[in-house]
Each structure stands twice: as C-alpha cells, then as structure tokens.
C-alpha cells in the first residue's frame, strides 16, 4: 500500500473527495485532516495579561474611526 499526502484548495477539495469516494473502496482508505487554521481556531488569548497603550492618546474614538473610514469614500 502507498500513501499520498496532498494540500488541496477549497474549490478542488470537493471534486477530489467525490472522485476518491467513488473509486474502489477496497483499495483506497481516505484519511482527512482538518485544515491548520480550523485546528487553532479554538485557542483563546487572554489579552488582560498585556498592557496596551497604543490608543490612549485618542480623545474621541468615534471621531477618530470616522476620520479613518473617510479615506475609503
């Protein structure tokens, strides 16, 4: 028996799995791994342990956000 490992994009994944599942199932065993980003999606970071002073100088956060978003218009 041989092992083939593939990294497949989302668009090709469904087509490839369809093909593999419709081949001779006595000859092929499909082993699926979760994508890397979904495995780490459950990890949380406690930001209370960090002191972030980057936005302390902003007097009016709403006005500051509106000025930044005005660049997109």
Image (tube, rainbow, N blue to C red):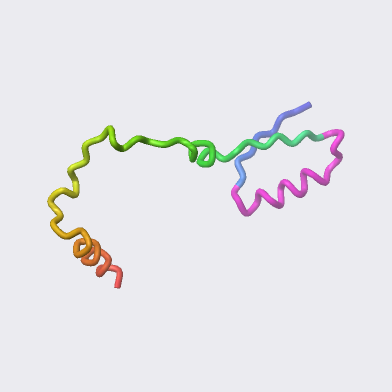
Image x and y of residue 73, in percent: 29, 73
State the quadrant of the N terminus.
top right
Residue 25: image quadrant is top right
Residue 46 vertical placement versus 13 (above, below) = above
Q: Which is nearer the eye, 63 or 25? A: 63
Residue 36 vertical placement versus 3 (above, below) = below
- Identify the magenta region: 9-27
Q: Residue at x 84, y 33 (%)?
A: 27
Q: Residue at x 20, y 61 (%)?
A: 64
Q: Residue at x 60, y 51 (%)?
A: 10
Residue 29: image quadrant is top right
Judge whether residue 16 is colored magenta. Answer: yes
Image x and y of residue 8, in percent: 62, 45
Q: Residue at x 28, y 32 (%)?
A: 49
Judge whether residue 17 is colored magenta. Answer: yes
Left or right of residue 73: residue 39: right
Q: Which is nearer the eye, 59 or 25? A: 59
Total labels: the figure holds 0
Q: Residue furthest bottom?
A: 73
Image x and y of residue 42, in percent: 49, 38
């Amino acid at each position: 028996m041989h092992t083939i490992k593939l990294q497949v994009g989302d668009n090709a994944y469904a087509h490839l799995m369809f093909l593999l599942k419709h081949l001779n199932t006595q000859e092929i065993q499909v082993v699926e791994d979760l994508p890397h980003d979904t495995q780490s999606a459950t990890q949380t970071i406690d930001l209370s342990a960090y002191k972030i002073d980057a936005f302390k100088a902003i007097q009016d956060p709403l006005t500051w956000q509106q000025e930044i978003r005005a660049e997109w218009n």
